[in-house]
Amino acid sequence: MKEYYYDKLLNIKTKGNRRGGGPANKLLHYHPYEPTPYSALEELFRHYEVKSSDRVVDFGCGKGRLNFYLHYFFHATVVGVEMNELLYQAAVENQGSYERKTKKGGDRIQFHCCLAEEYVIDARENRFYFFNPFSIQVFRKIVDNILLSVGKAERGIELVLYYPSADYIYFLENYTSFELKEEVLLPHLYEHNPNERFLIYRLEI
């Protein structure tokens, strides 16, 4: 029900899943598209604050569900990075539909079609979202890119992980200076599947 309600509210189409659409040698490292359930987003943002001054990057954004949700409810600047050309095109089409209905968006909503590890981190970006979109090898490269960016432009950084893999957690806690700030468990789901949670890691300056 919420999938239908929010897609209609935002005038977008984000349901479904898809594999492929990128370089063949990369498909082993990239996982199929699956949007974060709206019910999970509701629970996350009951506990986790996003401000209009934040600039949020969603790696493996798919059709842009998180981007439009954050822009609509929190007026944040949002960036979606997607390697799958078909999903990227769907996100761009959703942006047009969203902006026609809401009359807002403009340069505060951006989508990029490229490999996540090749995306150039903007010095203004301070929140990064991951729904277990790719292998630990790719994740490590992205975190390295984020840390290089912080070295050039110091700022507080937060990583939001949904359905976090053990590899991601081990890497962050043993090989980086990120510290666990908060854990958000999804009611009625976490009891049956311990992956049904969000982890927020913060890097202080």
Image (tube, rainbow, N blue to C red):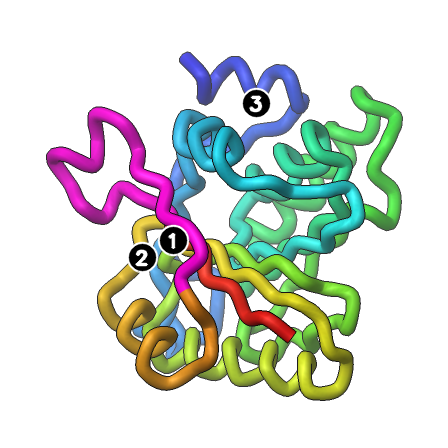
Per the image, the residue denoted by label 2 is 164
- Real-space Cα separation, disc 2 to disc 1, in angstroms: 7 Å
Give residue 183's position: percent from left, percent from top. 36, 47
Residue 59 is left or right of residue 11, and the answer is left
Kind of residue at badge 1:
Leu
Tell me the crowding category of disc 1: few under 14, some 14 to 19, or many 20 or more residues within 10 angstroms, Cα based.
Answer: some
Residue occupying the point 38% across, 67% down = 134
Vertical arrangement, residue 34 with respect to residue 172, above or below: above
Mark 2 secondary-structure assignment:
loop
Asked if the magenta segment contains residue 54, the reply would be no
Q: Mark 3 and 2 residues: CB-CB less than 8 Å, in contact?
A: no
Q: Quadrant of the N terminus?
A: top left
Q: Residues within 10 Å of mark 3 (few under 14, many from 20)?
A: some
Label 3, on which residue?
7
Along the line of sight, the residue nearer the viewer: 124 or 5: 124
Instruction: Specify start and end residues of the magenta stretch as a single range.
Output: 180-198
Checking the image for residue 199, the label placed there is 1
Relative to residue 149, is residue 69 depicted above or below?
Answer: above
